[in-house]
Image (spheres, rainbow, N blue to C red):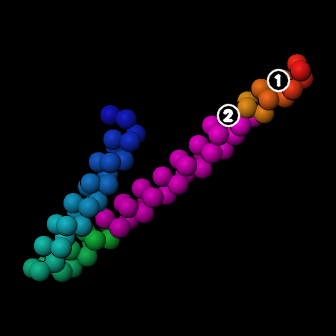
Amino acid sequence: MNTDQKRENSNCLAVYVLAVTAFVARSNARPALFGVAASALLLLFIGIHNAWDTVTYHVFVKKQRDSETEQSNSEGEASE
């Protein structure tokens, strides 16, 4: 199971817990609020992780790709 599948499973779990707590809230309001809080925290951590992945991609992969493109362009100009 790769990282994207784990993240999808976590998203589904958070939404499932939120949906279940909506039904539980009618009979047990206090435990349902803990379920809502847990679901919100899980979604928050997933969002932070996604943002971290995006930043690291731009810093390491895209920056390296841009520098390689600049080097190939400068080599092309030097050979002319």
Name the amino acid type tagged 2.
Answer: Arg
- Between the residue at mark 2 and the residue at mark 1, the CA separation in whole angstroms equals 17 Å
User: Label 1: which residue?
Assistant: 76
Residue 53 horizontal side relative to residue 37, left or right: right
Mark nearest the camera among 2 and 1 is: 1
Marker disc for residue 10? none
**Magenta segment: does it hold 56?**
yes
Residue 36: quadrant of the picture: bottom left
What kind of element bears circle 1? helix
What kind of element bears circle 2? helix
**Nearer the N terminus, badge 2 or badge 1?**
2
Residue 12: quadrant of the picture: bottom left
- For the record, the magenta segment spans 39-67
Residue 33: quadrant of the picture: bottom left
Q: Foreground: 39 or 69? A: 69
User: Label 2: which residue?
Assistant: 65
